[in-house]
Amino acid sequence: MKQTWEPSQEGVLVLPSGRSVRGRGLHYALPEGPLPEFGLYLLGKRPPRVEWESRWLLWPDLRLPADENEALDAFREAWRRAETERVEVACWRGIGRTGTALACIAILDGVPPAQAVSYVRRKYRWRTVETPGQRRYVARFHA
C-alpha cells in the first residue's frame, strides 16, 4: 500500500508521474501530519538525527553539491522511494538547495531540463533555485 504525501499538504511537489516529494526548510517547525519515511538532507554539515531513515548530501549554502555523482545517486534514491514512501527533501530554508534538488528529481521523472526550474517554481515555491550556478546545474543535469 502506498504511503505517499497528500498533494494538498504544505510543501508537496507532485511530479508528472504522480509521485510526490515534500520540500521543506529545517529552520522551520516540522509540518503537521504524517512523518516522512525517508529524508534527503542537503546541508554543509551533518543534519540532526531524525526518527525516520535519512541520507545526508554535503551541500554548502548557496552552492552546489560537493560530489555530483553522490548527488545523482541521492536524487535517484529519493525519486525511486517516492513511488511508495513519504519522501522529504530539505535544506536550511527549503528554497535554494531544496528547489535545485527537486528540479533534478523532476528531470528524473521526465521534465525536460530546460523546464525543470519553472516547473518547480510553479508547483513548489516561486523563489526556489536561488543562484545562477544552481540554475545552470539544473539546466545541464542529465539522468
Image (cartoon, rainbow, N blue to C red):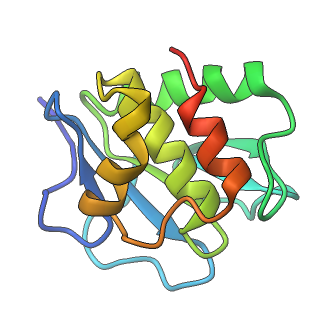
Residue at 30% in and 36% down: 85
Q: Please determine whether, in this image, residue 99 is positioned above or below residue 76.
A: below
> Count the marks: how many?
0
Is residue 7 rendered to the left or right of residue 90?
A: left
Q: Picture coordinates of residue 12 (x, y %)?
A: 27, 59
Q: Which residue extends farthest top?
A: 143
Q: Picture coordinates of residue 69 (x, y %)?
A: 75, 18
Q: Which quadrant of the figure contains the N terminus?
A: top left
Depth order, front residue of 88/121: 121
In which image quadrant can residue 51 be found?
Answer: bottom right
The answer to whether one can see residue 38 in this image is: no
The answer to whether one can see residue 122 in this image is: yes
In which image quadrant can residue 10 be found?
Answer: bottom left
Q: Please determine whether, in this image, residue 79 is positioned above or below residue 29.
A: above
Is residue 52 rendered to the left or right of residue 61?
A: left
Residue at 80% in and 54% down: 63
Is residue 101 rendered to the left or right of residue 57?
A: left
Depth order, front residue of 137/10: 137
Q: Picture coordinates of residue 24 (x, y %)?
A: 47, 67
Depth order, front residue of 29/16: 16
Q: Picture coordinates of residue 52 (x, y %)?
A: 52, 49
Depth order, front residue of 30/113: 113
In which image quadrant can residue 138 be found?
Answer: top right
Is residue 39 rendered to the left or right of residue 109?
A: right
Residue at 36% in and 77% down: 31
